[in-house]
Each structure stands twice: as structure tokens, then as C-alpha cells.
């Protein structure tokens, strides 16, 4: 089985690169290869100027890998866990104490350090898990879905922290399914599907090159592809990629106003009642759907029907 | 060993001890089994005299060093369980992702295991005295036989860790008891002197590492002997080194998987 094929991307310094794509597309494999815990069967990987497979100890001093699973010992206290890992990362004495104190403060763990991890909430565990990966001030920080299970405050807090780290010369690679957060916080995004790199660049450039304006129309009754009006609709100028799901129509439109008018007047002339419609502006979610072929039912967080940038004229339509 | 390496070993050793102490039930169970064996075998064969050149000794006295070594063997065989728990929580993966030398991680864990096993064996020994065993020890011999017993514990803890790392299944630790412990125990001189064994079993017992550890302890406890470094300590040290090497390789492999 080929897990990754033709992946060619570069994580820049002082920046956050998001890796996104459907489950099982190979994102974690990319991260594990960069972390040196997996070796590619072919191809070249250079991490901080070195081959991760050949320089694993050297690399482990400079790379932080925060796995998706919160890997903690429930029987240890937060302080014991931090001290153990600080020693394993080569810290000692005052430097170790200062680093633990700094991280505990910045991650708001200080008053929980004496507690055993088994008494921690999910958010606290994730913060401690993150702290362990930051003890050695990695030059490259790799995070696999770090916001999973965090409440909105925790998520906002994490992104502020990551942005702060990029100012300290860290390069950050983060796997996330939250496309809204990618657009807001990441400098670059790699869209991976089926083990291939489908798009790579700034979120703006990926949207510009791959996203389309989507018109979604809710009809009063179910329609099916043999319906003659549907065939006609698909052939209208400026309308592409018509999808039908019960009474819901979805299509790419090239020019918003003229295409919208043509669609609505055609449906009206065929006596097909329209309950509502809205135009979804091009965004990362539409690029994601278009490139991965993922259906709305499988959509990632932040890419839902209500999450795209809807136009203000979204309205109820009278038949 | 550098100061940084010592810190790694002591930190991992401290964690392993801390976890052992948080499971007092498991610790006490590992004492109950040898005690039961000592009481049953000791009283069952109380009329049995063990022949040796120059006289004979009571069976309970003969049995006590064997039970102490058995305590170490059975305790060592369960050493891998903690690694399996760490694999299940992904904590081991996390430890292996640090730049710390993996051999030092293993040394730290095995040091904790060996000190715990020796402490348990000491407790069993003291309980043996309480139930009537009599000894006539040599202190230098006792010190060297503790080293021999420690090396034996180190070797079999490393073997248990290897099996745990390769199988990743808690059930494998139960299999270890039947496949490794029992054959090792019953082909050693823990319960019966080699001269009273059938000839083929006597030959097997001579190359059994448990016989070496039991022999060292028995000689120093009962006959004021000092174990031979070349015939007892060195072979056990080589066995410990070999099994440690295999366990280190298994740990490196686990890091890649």
C-alpha cells in the first residue's frame, strides 16, 4: 500500500503550516516522517538541514512532536511528569526549574501541578501534553490535531501560543480539520488527499486557485437527475458541477448575479418552487470539497453549510 | 557515566519505584506466593534431610535461599507489564521521542526492578527466619551473592521487557511464567540438591542460571562460603549483558514501530 505519493512541500521558518485533508489521507504519516519516527521507503526528507532517519537523536533534540493521543501517565502528577521529561531533554538545575515554571505559567498549569494526571480534565491533559513537547524549545514543532477536545477558549489560547512560538524562530506544522482556524491562523496550508498533495500555499492562494462560488438552492420537492429541468439547469451558462441531494441543489457558479438570475428564472419558468437559496463565497472549505471530492456529510469542522462565508442576501424565497 | 546520564537513570528509576509503591496489593501478592511455597514445601518435607559432604542439613534451611531466588525470578518475569501499560497509554512512545539514550531508559527501569526484587527477597528471607530457618552466613559471601542475585534479576527482567516489547500483550506475561519460570525453577537446585536429582536433570541444573544464583546464596547463607566470581558472578553478568542488549534492540524497534 502506498501511503504517500509525490508529496513535495516545505515548512518555512517563523511560520505555521497547516496540514489538512480527509481522515486517512496521510497527514499523520507526513508528520511522523518529519519527526523521524517513520522512514519513507523512497524520496528525500530534509528536516533542519538533516536526514531525520539518519540523525534521529540530533533531531529529537530539536524537534517537538505532539501526537494526537494525549500520552501521559495518569499515576504521575503534572510536576513529576514535567520534571521527568525535562531531564530526558537534558535540562537540569535552575534552568529546568525556570523552564517548568515558565511553561506552567504560560499554559495555566501552575495550580494543577501537584495533582495526579488522572484527576485532570481533558483540556488540562492536553495542555500538559503540549507542555512536554515545548520543554526543549524545539526549532520545529509538529502537532497532530492539537485542538481536538479543547473548548473555544482553549483553542484560542493554543493559537495565540503557537503564534508566539513562531516569533521565536520556530517552524510549526499542525494537522487540523478546522478550516476556519487554518484561514485565520496559518501562514500556509497543505491539502492532502489519498496520500497526494492536492494543494499547497497560503490559504488565500489556495482559495484563489481552487475554490469556487457555490450556489445552494433548497426546493419545495425532491428532484432526481432524470428530471428534464435538471438537465437544462446543468447546461446553463456559468453553472458547473451540479449536485442533487433530495430537494437540495448545489452548483458552482462563475458569475454570481447573472448565474443566479438564470438559475432562479429557469426554475420559476418550470414551476419548481424554491424555498430558499444562498451563495457561498469561495473559501478554503469549498477548495477542500472540490479537491478532495469529500461530500458534505464527511465535511471537516468549519466547513459546514453554515460555516462558509454566506452572502448577506441569503433569504427565504417565495415560489 | 556522565551526570546527565545518571540523572536520566535515576529519574526513570524513581518513576518505576513510585509506580510500584502505588500498587501495594501487587507488591504484597508477589510476597505471598514465595511464602506459601516456603511454608508448604518447608513443612511438607520437614523430615527430609539434605545430604552434603560432612553431614546433612534441614530442608527448611536448604529451601530458604531457593525461595529467595524464586522471589526474584517470579518478580522479574512480571517486569514487562509496566512497559505494556506504557505502550497502551502511548507514554512509552513519548519517552522514546525524547533525545535520551534508550539504553539509559532501560537501565533506569531495570535498576528499579532489581532493587525492588532484592528488597522483596530480603523480606522473604527475614520471614523465613521467623518461621524457623537457621543460617550461618558469611557477610562478604552474602554481599557477592546479592550481586549474583541482582544480576540474575536484571537478566530476567530484561527478558520480560523484551517479550513485552515484542508481543505488546499483557497475556504474554502469564505465558512467561509457564514457559520460562516453571522449567527454570524445576530444573534448578532451588528445591532439590543436584546430587539427589536424576542424572540428566542434574546436568541440566548445572547450566541453569537460577542454580548459579541459588548456589551462591545458599553457600553464603548456610556454609559461610564466598561465591566464585569466575564460575558464578561472571556467567550471570554475561547473561545479564546479553539479555540487556536484546531488550535494548527491542526498545529501539518499538520506537520505530
Image (spheres, coloured by chain):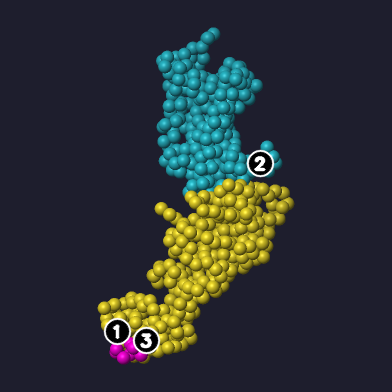
Residue visible at 57% across and 19% down? B231
Quarter residue A134 falls in: bottom right
Chain bearing tag 1 is: A
Up the image or down, A250 lies above or below A38; here it is: below
- Residue B239 location, x and y as percent? 54, 28
Task: Between residue A71 and residue A32, name the one nearer to us.
Answer: A32
Q: Which chain is yellow?
A: A
Q: Which residues are magenta?
A: A263-271
- Residue A264 within the magenta-colored segment of the rendering: yes
Query: Which residue does the numbered mark 2 point to in the structure image?
Result: B5
How crowded is the residue under tag 3: few (<14 C-alpha within 10 Å), some, or many (20+)? many
Q: Is residue A101 left or right of residue B25?
A: right
Q: Residue at x 67, y 65 (%)?
A: A167
On the same chain: label 3 and label 1? yes
* On screen, residue A70 above or below B118: below
Distance from the alpha carbon under mark 2 to that under mark 1? 76 Å
Q: Is residue B165 left or right of residue A102?
A: left
| In magenta segment, residue B164 | no
Q: Is residue B190 above or below residue A138?
A: above
Q: Can you tell which mark lies on residue A229? A: 1
Is residue A247 in view from this perspective? yes
- Name the residue carrying label 3: A263
Amino acid at each position: 500500500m502506498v501511503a504517500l505519493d509525490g508529496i513535495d512541500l516545505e515548512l518555512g521558518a517563523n511560520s505555521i503550516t497547516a496540514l489538512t485533508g480527509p481522515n486517512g489521507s496521510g497527514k499523520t504519516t507526513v508528520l511522523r516522517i518529519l519527526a523521524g519516527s517513520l522512514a519513507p521507503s523512497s524520496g528525500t526528507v530534509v528536516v533542519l538541514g538533516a536526514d531525520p532517519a539518519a540523525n534521529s537523536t540530533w533531531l529529537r533534540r530539536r524537534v517537538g512532536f505532539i501526537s494526537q493521543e494525549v500520552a501521559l501517565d495518569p499515576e504521575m502528577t503534572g510536576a513529576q511528569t514535567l520534571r521527568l521529561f525535562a531531564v530526558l531533554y537534558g535540562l537540569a538545575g535552575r534552568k529546568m526549574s525556570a523552564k517548568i515554571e515558565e511553561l506552567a505559567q504560560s499554559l495555566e498549569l501552575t495550580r494543577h501541578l501537584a495533582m495526579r494526571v488522572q484527576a485532570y480534565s481533558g483540556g488540562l491533559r492536553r495542555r500538559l501534553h503540549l507542555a512536554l513537547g515545548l520543554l526543549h524549545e524545539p526549532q520545529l514543532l509538529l502537532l497532530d490535531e492539537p485542538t481536538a477536545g479543547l473548548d473555544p477558549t482553549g483553542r484560542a489560547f493554543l493559537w495565540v501560543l503557537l503564534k508566539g512560538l513562531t516569533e521565536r524562530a520556530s517552524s510549526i506544522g499542525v494537522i487540523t480539520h478546522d478550516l476556519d482556524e487554518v484561514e485565520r491562523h496559518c501562514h500556509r496550508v497543505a491539502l492532502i488527499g489519498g496520500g497526494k498533495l492536492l494543494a499547497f500555499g497560503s490559504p488565500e492562494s489556495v482559495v484563489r486557485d481552487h475554490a469556487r462560488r457555490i450556489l445552494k438552492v433548497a426546493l419545495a420537492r425532491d428532484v432526481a437527475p432524470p428530471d428534464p429541468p435538471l438537465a437544462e439547469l446543468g447546461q446553463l451558462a456559468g453553472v458547473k458541477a451540479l449536485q442533487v441531494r433530495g430537494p437540495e441543489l448545489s452548483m458552482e457558479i462563475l458569475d454570481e448575479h447573472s448565474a443566479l438570475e438564470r438559475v432562479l428564472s429557469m426554475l420559476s419558468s418550470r414551476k419548481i418552487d424554491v424555498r430558499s437559496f444562498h451563495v457561498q463565497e469561495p473559501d478554503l472549505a469549498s477548495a477542500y470539497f472540490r479537491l478532495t471530492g469529500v461530500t458534505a456529510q464527511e465535511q471537516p469542522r468549519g466547513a459546514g453549510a453554515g460555516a462558509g462565508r454566506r452572502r448577506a442576501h441569503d433569504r427565504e424565497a417565495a415560489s | 557515566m556522565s551526570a546527565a546520564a545518571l540523572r536520566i537513570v535515576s529519574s526513570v528509576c524513581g518513576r518505576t519505584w513510585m509506580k510500584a509503591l502505588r500498587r501495594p496489593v501487587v507488591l504484597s501478592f508477589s510476597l505471598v506466593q514465595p511464602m506459601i511455597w516456603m511454608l508448604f514445601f518447608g513443612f511438607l518435607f520437614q523430615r527430609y534431610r539434605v545430604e552434603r559432604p560432612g553431614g546433612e542439613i534441614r530442608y527448611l534451611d536448604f529451601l530458604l535461599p531457593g525461595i529467595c531466588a524464586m522471589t526474584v525470578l517470579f518478580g522479574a518475569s512480571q517486569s514487562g507489564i509496566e512497559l505494556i501499560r506504557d505502550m497502551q497509554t502511548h507514554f512509552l512512545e513519548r519517552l522514546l521521542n525524547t533525545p535520551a539514550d534508550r539504553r539509559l531508559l532501560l537501565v533506569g527501569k531495570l535498576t528499579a526492578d532489581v532493587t525492588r526484587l532484592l528488597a522483596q527477597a530480603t523480606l522473604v528471607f527475614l520471614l523465613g527466619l521467623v518461621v524457623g530457618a537457621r543460617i550461618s552466613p558469611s557477610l562478604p559471601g552474602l554481599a557477592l551473592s546479592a550481586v549474583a542475585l541482582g544480576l540474575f534479576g536484571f537478566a530476567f527482567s530484561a527478558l520480560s521487557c523484551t517479550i513485552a516489547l515484542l508481543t505488546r500483550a499483557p497475556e504474554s506475561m502469564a505465558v512467561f511464567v509457564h514457559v520460562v519460570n516453571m522449567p527454570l525453577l524445576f530444573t534448578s537446585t532451588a528445591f532439590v540438591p543436584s546430587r539427589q536429582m536424576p542424572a540428566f536433570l542434574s546436568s541440566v541444573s548445572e547450566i541453569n542460571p537460577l542454580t548459579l544464583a541459588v548456589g551462591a546464596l545458599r553457600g553464603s547463607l548456610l556454609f559461610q562460603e564466598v561465591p566464585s566470581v569466575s564460575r558464578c558472578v561472571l556467567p550471570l553478568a554475561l547473561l545479564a549483558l546479553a539479555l540487556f542488549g536484546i531488550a535494548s534492540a527491542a526498545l529501539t524497534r518499538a520506537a520505530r514501530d
